[in-house]
Amino acid sequence: MKKLLLSLSLTAAILCSCSKTSDSDSALREIADSVRQKFVPDRRVNVFDVNFKHADGKILLKGATTVAEAKSELLNSLQAVNKNIIDSMIILPDEKLGDEIYGVVTLSVASMRTSGDYSAEMATQALLGMPVKILQSGGWLRVQTPEGYISYTSAGNIKRMNRQEFDEWISSPKIIFTEIYGFAFAEPNSGKVISDMVAGNMLKLEGETGQYYKASYPNGKIAYVDKKQSKKFDEWYSSISLTGDNIADYGKRFMGIPYLWGGTSSKAMDCSGFVKTVFFMHGIILQRDASQQCYTGQPVDIDNDFNSLAPGDLLFFGSKAQDGKKERIGHVAIYMGNKQFIHEATQVKISSFDPSDPNYDKYNANRLVRASRIIGNIDTKGITTIQSNGFYQQQK
């Protein structure tokens, strides 16, 4: 009987202790959530990972953030309710990286995932020659791309650099691949492939040999690229004519390219990746997702039978705010004029708002939410040129 009472007493004590721990964790989590909402409302562009671990009557705060102010407020708020907080949370970029917080993509298209695992959902892609900021390292790298998007990629996809190496890469003359798809070769006219190439890939210009540019990859590998499929970056950039008609017309070059969730290359792409690629090939860097792009540029009236829209404007689809529910944006397209738009939906195709048009898209016509004008609003929030973007500049 005594043994039974002792067992029941111990069980009750354990349950009581677990209940207190659970209540404590719940309170701590509420504080962390409040701080996250204040400082990191969009986890796609900033990090706020918080974990609590109990050890010897103390609470170990673990995790990482890119916002130092968020960590400071979190600690102050936690210690106000519990003095036994031990800080083990790191600020990104991780100081263990030293000066190697810079990187450049080394293959035509690098997949970026939501976590460091090949089975994880693809978040976005990065192109050959694209600069990134490295936040954490390991078998996978946690990186940030020029539009601010944060995700994970295999360490083999990135050439890590210190600041001097990165500045040398950034300041060196480049070529840009301008065709939808092609190859770089080991020798001129050799047919021996070094790698495939997609629109927007960039390599360091090393010289010229006949109809080929001699170029080098971020890791120093030498290749030859056909001049018919590429241009010197400075010449290409200065020749860009950023007009709505040119944006709409260029989009047609991708007709039939298949849909890929997370895709941002001319191999395959999603709806916002298609828009992003079209503008990138006009020297403009847009935000990654449709739900981010819709808050950039100048809003355009969509209620006047589309008369206020101009070619090159972005159209956003989803559901409007109503009945207490927030607006939701899930799709984006480029307006072409005459009530037509081009978008990536199963494949890149042209659709219409006009019921008499063979390409009439009733589904999207009924869920148009808003429109935005990018042209004329360069270097405003969420819209930069390649040259004005800090990732493409030497680091001071």
Image: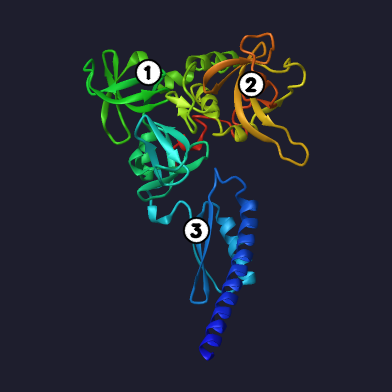
Using the numbered discs, state the Cα–Cα distance from disc 1 to disc 2 in whole angstroms: 28 Å
Q: Nearer the viewer, residue 65 or 370?
A: 370
Whether residue 396 is visible:
no
Q: Nearer the viewer, residue 227 or 208?
A: 227
Residue name at image x 38 percent, y 27 percent: 202
Q: How is the image coloured?
A: rainbow
Closer to the chain start, of discs 1 and 3, is 3
Closer to the chain start, of discs 3 and 2, is 3
Amino acid type indicated by mark 2: Asp
Location of the C terminus (image quadrant): top left
State whether residue 318 is above or below residue 42: above
- In the picture of the structure, the residue carrying the numbered disc 1 is 230
- In the picture of the structure, the residue carrying the numbered disc 3 is 63
Name the spot of residue 32 as percent of width and height, x first: 61, 59
Q: Which mark is residue 313?
A: 2
Q: Residue furthest bottom?
A: 2
Amino acid type indicated by mark 3: Gly
